Structures are given as C-alpha cells and as structure tokens.
Image (cartoon, coloured by chain):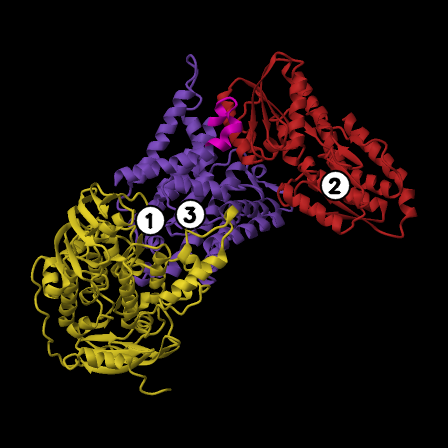
Amino acid sequence: MKRFWHVRELSTVAILVLEILFFGWYLWPDGNRAHPFLNAENALLILKYSSIYGIAAVGAAVVIISGGIDLAPGSIIALASVVCGVLFVDLGWGLGPSLLAALLVGVASGTLSAILIVAVKLPPFIATLGVMGMTRGLAFIITEGRYFDLSSKLSGGWRPLGLPADWVAPLVMIGLAIVFQILMTRFQWGRQIFAIGGNETAALFSGVAVGRIKTSVYLLSGLLAAVAGVVLALVQGQGKADLATGYELDIIASAVVGGASLSGGRGSVMGAVLGTLIFGVLRNALPQIPGATFYDRLIVGLAVIVIVVMDQLLLKRGE
Amino acid sequence: MPGLEFQDVRKSFGAVRALTGVTFSVREAEAHALVGENGAGKSTLLKILAGIVHPDGGELRWRDAPLSLSSPRDALERGIGMVYQEMLSFPNLSVTANIFAGRELTAAGGRLRDAEMEARTVALLDELHLRISPRATAESLPAAYRQLLQVARALAFECRILVLDEPTTALTDAEADHLFAVLAKLKARGVTLLYVSHRLPEVFRLCERITVLRDGAHAGTFDTSDVTQERIVRAMVGRDLPPRAAHAARGASAAPALTARGLTRRPYFRDVSLEVGAGEIVGLFGLVGSGRSELLETIFGLHKAQSGTIDVAGTRLRAHSPRQAARRGIALVPEERHRQGLFFNLTLRHNLMMPARTVAGDILIRDAEERKQCEQLMSEWRVKAPGPGALPDSLSGGNQQKVVLAKWLATSPRILMLDEPTKGVDVGAKFEIHEIIRRQAAKGLGCLVVSSDLPEILALCDRILVMREGRIQGELSGAAAGEESVMHLATSPLRDAS
Amino acid sequence: MAWVMAGIAVASACSKEEKPASGSSAAQTLRFAVIPKALDIPVFNYAKIGAERAAKELGNVQIEWRAPETADQLRQKEILESFITQRVDGIAISALNGDFLTDTINRAIDAGIPVVTWDSDAPKSKRIAFYGVDDFASGRIMGEQAIKLLGGKGKVAVITSVGATNLQRRLEGLRDALKAAPGIEVVEAYDIKEDAVRCAEIIATGSRRYPDLGAWLSVGGWPVFTRNALSGIDSSKTKVISFDTVESAIDLLREGKVQVLLGQKYFGWGSEPVKLLHGIKNGRQPAAPIIDSGVDIVTLENVDAYVAEFKRLEQGK
C-alpha cells in the first residue's frame, strides 16, 4: 500500500495480459475475417458483464483487507434489483427514487452485518451468512416468484447522462475502483483498515476506533453490492430474486486472485477489480471455443488455484 | 566426553548472516546456558536444533555421530525436546491432549488409547509436582503451568536433550523456583539441558557453563564458577555499559499529569488511587496477576472501570475509549509488542504514524511529511532499520520495542504508561530504552512503568507503588527503596482484609 | 392455436364431468399438496392459479402450495417428506430430479397417499400418473419449427442448462428432429447454468463468434425473460425460437425479436393434477399413466388469440 500501484497488482495485470494474449492467439480467425475476441466491441462486452462482479468486488476487497469476510453481496445484488424493480415497475416510482431506495436497502443490509459483527461480536462469516439468507429471503418475499421487467419501461434509447446504456456499468466500476484505490492508499481511513486487518488488537492499542471503521467497511460492502444490483437491474433490464446466486464466492475469488489475503491486512481494490476482469475474459472467451462451455466451471476453479499459487511463488521470489 | 557439538554452523537469510560459523560443544548431562543479545543468532541456532531451519554449512554431532534433523518431528524422535518462550499449546485441548499432541498413542484403526495417555499424564504431572487435572483445558491453566506443560511434553517422549528458550519470562519467582527444581532433577537423571535466557542470575544459578553468541558468532564459553556477570555482559555487548544513572532528585511538580481516584474493576483491581506528576517516573511493581496490566489498560480506555475517576492534567476523562485516551494525551506501550504493538503487514512508517495521525484526526496521508518525521524519530530513538519502508519483521526485539515506544512519543503525550518495557529485550537496548524514558521525563512527561524486573524499577523510578491482589499495597520513594523492602510489600498479606 | 383450443376443450370437459363426483364427497375437505420445482420460476404462478381454480371448481379441495425458494433438490425432497408425515390426501409434484425422488414418492404411495407428477416426471417411481409435455416430443417440435423457419439450411446454436432431466430430453428431441435436415448445422450447445444474466452474456458472445448464425434455439425460457438479452441480435439474419410464453416473451415476439415460442400448459400443470388426484380419491384411476399435455406453438399469426385465452385463464376462468 506504499504506492498507488503495488507489485501484486502488477502481477495481476500481467496475468490478465497473458490471458488476453493467449485467447487472442487461440481465437485468431482464418483468412481476413474480423477477430472475434480482440475488438473494441468485445472489450466493452467483457467490461459490461464483469462490472456486476467488479463493483461488488471493490467492497469485498475492503472487507477482506480489514480481516473480515462478506457472504452477502450476491443476495444484496438480487434484493437491490428486486427493490428497484418493484418500485419502478410495479409501484410506478420515478427511476431516481427507485434507485435511491435500492441503495438504501443495501446500506441497511450492510449496517445489519456491521451491528452483528461489531456490537453482537459474531464472527463475520456467521453474521454475513445470516444476512445473506435474510436478504435473499426478503427478495423472494417481495417478488413471490415473479420478476420485474425494467426493460419494458426503460425504452431502448435510454441514455443516462447522454451515454449509451452499455457504458454505464463499466464506467461505474472503473470510477469506483479508482476512488477506492485512492481512499485505501492515500487516506487515513484506508490505512486504518489495513492496520485492523493486520493486527486488530494492535489497532485498538494504537487508538484506532476499530468498531467505527469496521462498521464503515461492512456498510460500504452492502452499499456497493446494492450499486451492483442496481446496475444489473438497469443494464440487464430485470429485477429478480434468484439473480446472482453464488456470486459472493466469485467475488471473493476475484479479490483473492487480485492479491487479497483472507487472513487480512493484504490486498487491493484495483487488484480485485482486475481479478473480476480475469474471470470476465474467461467467461467471454471460453464460449467462443467449441465445446468449452461444459468445461468452464472446471477451468475457472483451476484458474483460481493456479493464479493464487503463481502469486505466492512470485511473492516468495520477490523476497 | 563430547555430548552435543556444533561445528562451524552457518546460516544466512537472504543478505542477513544469522550464524557465521559457530563452534562449541555441550557436555552430556550438563546444564549449559546460551546467552546473547537479540539478533545474536540464538533463535536461529535453536531452530536448527529443533529441525525447523536447516543450516547452510557445518554440522551438528551427538555422541561423536553426525546429527541431521530434517523436521521438528525428527528432532523430537531423536530425543531433543523444546520448551519455547511463547506458549505453544492448544488452548482448547486438555492437558493430556496437549502433551500427546501429534504423537497420540493409538490402538489398531487409529482409536485413541485415552486411558493409557491419561495415566502417563498423571505420572508426569506427579513427577513435576503439578497439581492439575489431566482433563483441564490448557487455557484454564496459569501461564507458568502452561510452560511446565511443555516440559512435561518433552519428558513424555524420553528426551535426552531439553532445550529451554526463555522459560521464565512469564513466571513469578516462586514458579521459577519450581521449574529450577524440576530441571535440577532432570539433570541428575542424565538429561542434557541447553538453557537460553536474558536473566543472568538464573543462568548462574542453574548452569555449569555459559556460551555467549554475538552477531552470529561464538564469543566465548565460560565456566560459571570462575566468571562474573559483568564479564558475560561485556562478552554479549562487546563493550562496557555505562553505570546506572543516579536518581535525579525531583520534587513533586505542581499539577499531577494523571490522577486516578478509587478506580475499581473487579476481579482485577479495586479502589486504586494514584497520581503521576509531570516529569515524574512512577513504578508499579507487583507479581504477575496482581492486576497491574489491567489497571494500565483500564486507564487507557480498553476496559470500562466499574467505579472511580480519571483526571488528565486536572480535567476529568469521560466517554472513555483508547482513541479518547490518546487524544487526551495518554499513551500505552503494551506488554506484548507482537500481539498488541505492531502491524506486521505494514512498513515502519505506517506503524510509527498510526497513533499520531489517528489522534490528529487526519484524513489524508501526507507521504513526504511522514517520511521526514519517521526518519527523525528513527534517528532520535536509534531504531536500527534499513529505513521507514522496512517491515517490522526485519527488526530485532529491542528495535521493535523502540518502534512501539517511538510511535507513542510521536503523539506528544502527557502521560506515558509502559507495561514491561524491556521484556525480551537485550541488555544494550534495555539501557537505551531506560535512557529514552529518563529523557522524556526530564522534558516533563509523566511516566507510569509496570515491570516485574525489580532492578529495573529500582533503577528507573522516582516513586514505587506496590500492587498486590488488585490493590495498592504501599508506596516507596525511589531513593529509599531496596529490593527487600519492595518484595516485602509485594508478598506480605494485605493490610486490611476488606 | 389448435393446441390451445383442444387443451381448453379437454379441460372444460373434465371439469363438467367431475362436478357431480365432487359433490358426493363434500362432507370432508381433501388436502392436496402441490409442489412446483421452485418458487422463483415465474411460470409456476400460472400453475398455482390453475390449481386453485380447479380446487374451487371441485369445491371440497384445499391446495397446499409449497416449494423450495430456488431449484434445490434436497429442499424439495424435504418438503415432499414433510407432506408424507402430514398425511395429506394427495401429492402433485414437479420433480427437480425424478430419480432422486423415486424412493420418497414410493414411500408416499406405500403410505396410501396418491402421487401424480406434472411438468417433470419421476418415471421410475410408483407415481400413478404424469401430466405434462413429453419433453422429447416437444424438443422435436422445436426442431421441426426450426427447419421450417430456416428453410432447411443454416447454422444454429442451442442454449440449455446442464443438469435438468427434462431439458436434456428436449435437447435430445431437438437434435433428433434436426437430423431430418442435413443442411442445418448445430455449431454449439451452450450451458448457461440456469442464470439469465449468463444467458445474455452467452448470446452476446456467441453472436460475435458466429456472425452468420441462422437461429438461436433455447430449450428454456432464459433468453425471453427480458428484452435485453436479445437486443444485440440482427433479426433479419438470426431467428430465435424459445420455450416459455411469459409476458416479456410475447412482447419480443410482437417486436420480431423472436419468431416462435413454445408454451407449456402452465394452467393445466396446476389444474389437471388436482383433478387427477380428486378422481383417484373418488375411485377413478386415470386412463393412462402418461397424459401428454402437448405444447402451444405461438407465432406472430396466432399471438393475439393466445394472449386473449391466456388472460381468461389467468383470471381463474
């Protein structure tokens, strides 16, 4: 965390570049057809789908650096999309108030996690496991198995701030990544999070308001998951209770691939977002290889192990 | 007759040469001490003997045969038992399970032979005169017993060489006596003891010979009978130490920096009242468990007092938390620097700046300014480190302690509370830390020092408060106090039985 | 359209026939457990409406509608077992995994509780009857529609989700039918893991990989759950045939993004099993163990009539 770009982030970038080069080579078209993988449109596609994970991964990285874990993001994404949907589609609220309400639901979920962890002193795994179940359950109660079709109300030409809708999610992700990278490396708040993750007792003995900082961390994670949910609802045009099932593990995996240590005190926001891009490229490129679709679970699982082991080897070499 | 021999043992970690060719031998069935400042290479040597670290060159021999140890288990199987400074126990497991951890006696199919293990545990505990249940969990035992548990574990496997690394750090004198009695019995049975300690009186009491390491090299082996403590210290440090500073006669200053009245937190301490004047060094002495650390932690806001008041420079402290305390000028250098003092994932700069910037309520990190301030702090307090970008791991214990001290001095506190400020620190660093405390006091800082090291208290403090079983038992002025008068207060029955 | 009409005719005929029977045992209310695959699959709401309508028509039937929140086999088995211990009067279930539930269904039958399956069968069990589409046959229908739409030649990509037996059967039927047109090449079968977002991503990626694709064939409704999944498709070049006739699917059909939809008898899923159970309780065994519901084939030509009929059924008529 000394510099804005850390060595481990550079290794994540290196993995991403290698991955892109590999698929660029593997998918090289015959003759002079356009390249199906290496083109601007496809890059936007990868960014668009990765951003759902990426936005939540910003929060997950901060939680993991603080020495905690958050299992709720997947469910909060679904709940936020549902809340946004029910208000906007069913109850006829304006788009702005609906989005705001969805974000508030995320903040509330994060606050609940924070209370359970900081005040009730539950282990983060247990507390967020509970919140995960509650938020998912709430989403089902609201939808009663239906889903909300936002796309029918957001006409095709929906252009927030004059931008094409597809650009919204990647821009939000990149913006949040930069903002939080700066907050984590250049601000006392971020340094205190690293300190708590490294040694919570020493942080307490150093006068850090540990409870307050941890509260802010889980609250943020909830908020960012809700942002991901809202973006999902807008870009994919649906609010649905079973969306993003199991995404929490993909999000945690991205943060880990991006250099975060599950024992806390190590990691980076930028790395986590790059981690989601590594998986995003896999999700994009594998379907372009005939027959590979049935292997992608296996390949993604393998990739997590290989990348983390590679990272550890690089780190040892560095020492 | 040669027992355990170290022949030209070398080991480097990266660019750091921890051992530069150490040769000495330990006779069979003798008690042999290994001393040296932190960073002299003792721990590396012990790790080699425990099979954790493999030497780059040279060899170990036992009874004239090469001894190569591939793993901790290997070492244990060859009869080398280790008793570590840190309590390596499984707090959630029973005494029996701790003793047999990893080498459980099993019947066919892996079923545990519980009854047999328990019977052997009872026999071992008896041998060590430990009156504890074999079924008690390790966490329910006092520190000293946990230490003895490690001895029991070594004995359970018929060890021929028992290595003890600072075993008395957490023990009271009575407990240490108990340990020494056990060790003497073991020696009589033919067990070879390798004893590592900072406490020279102990070493002289227990051991026949002393080997001194300095900067990774062998600095001499001495017979205890014809050497003085001063000679050993000189061999350790490589120079003569200045004599202890005489007490500066300081009168009680006008406004006390810290006043506590009727502070109570059961069951740790009750009705404690004390005053620390500006520029005064007050010692707080007492045996382990007398409530000293808990008192400091409560003043620092880590725990809530059940009753009583705390005033800093005449102003009442309310809404108490470590952050509040730090803001009001109270600093605490805690007892366990590994667990409570340092962030091992962060560089020295961030370690040094954390309390000061938190107290200042900063939002942004100002790199250039912080770096300058750190370099200043490190040179002022003589922290030996490559620079502000180094990680705490790369520092010796004494330098780590100086970092913890410096990070609090950077907050410009009014009150500096120190809990065992020189625990596990080598002799050179100890004198430096004492010097820092004196210099700060001279500038008007009020200091409250907790220590189990009686000579330290006597050398450092203007006034000594003696605690016993959670109460202030008496007060002595530093000039008048002697070891006997302090110990008398610390161990005599409570003055009133309320 | 003929399918729809036929289906409705059968349904109404049944209900007329059964009215007197229900009257005779009105003394005691029958509790029937109806278990869909999961609560979060929208089309099962129609099945619920159907089941409740049938219950109302029969008069003395009470419906217990319960299911796992998401498609979770173990949870569904747990729910089934709890109904056996509750000694309900009959169970109608859409099995997430027929083989997994076989023993439990047999236990219910042995305990004297009649069990019928619907939508998704447990063929190896002792269940009395299955009402639903023959998946293999409906897969074939999809294949035949594709051949017709593409004029017998072109590249197609298939969307499925690995793990569900009925989707696997549809896929087999589809491949079987496509054998008849050697000019049609199946370039890829994508596994979208029951994730509608993933489906949208696959369609976007696959369209890039195969720019000359003639059609997307989806054996589940994921592409039509929202409009956006298909927004990148050039309808003049690439056609879409999908299962499911949810509301957004109808809109997509009218817009020309989708050419053919295959609709299940959603309301029948609920009403027919309830009527079967009621009949069994009154001593009438079903004529055959497998009752093929058929599928509705919805195209631009018959969409208005289909919607009108759908609305009528939705209001419980």
Residue C87 visible in the snapshot: yes
Q: Colour of chain A?
A: purple
Pointer 3: residues within 10 angstroms few (<14), some, or many (20+)? Answer: many
Of the residues shown, which amino acid type is indicated by label 2? Ile
Assess whether residue A313 is covered by the magenta stretch: no
Of the residues shown, which amino acid type is indicated by label 3? Gly
Q: Chain of mark 1?
A: A
Task: Identify the residue under disc 2.
Answer: C105
Tell me: A287 left or right of B9: right
Report helix, strand or loop for mark 1: helix
Pointer 2: residues within 10 angstroms few (<14), some, or many (20+)? Answer: many
Pointer 1: residues within 10 angstroms few (<14), some, or many (20+)? Answer: many
Image quadrant where residue C57 sits: top right
Tell me: A164 left or right of A3: right
Looking at the picture, does residue C15 appear above or below residue B259?
above
Give the residues in magenta: A286-299
Q: Colour of chain B?
A: yellow
Q: CA distance from mark 2 to mark 1?
A: 56 Å
Looking at the picture, does residue B138 appear above or below residue C131?
below
Tell me: B162 left or right of B225: right
Task: Identify the residue under disc 3.
Answer: A59
Foreground pick, B470 / A36: B470
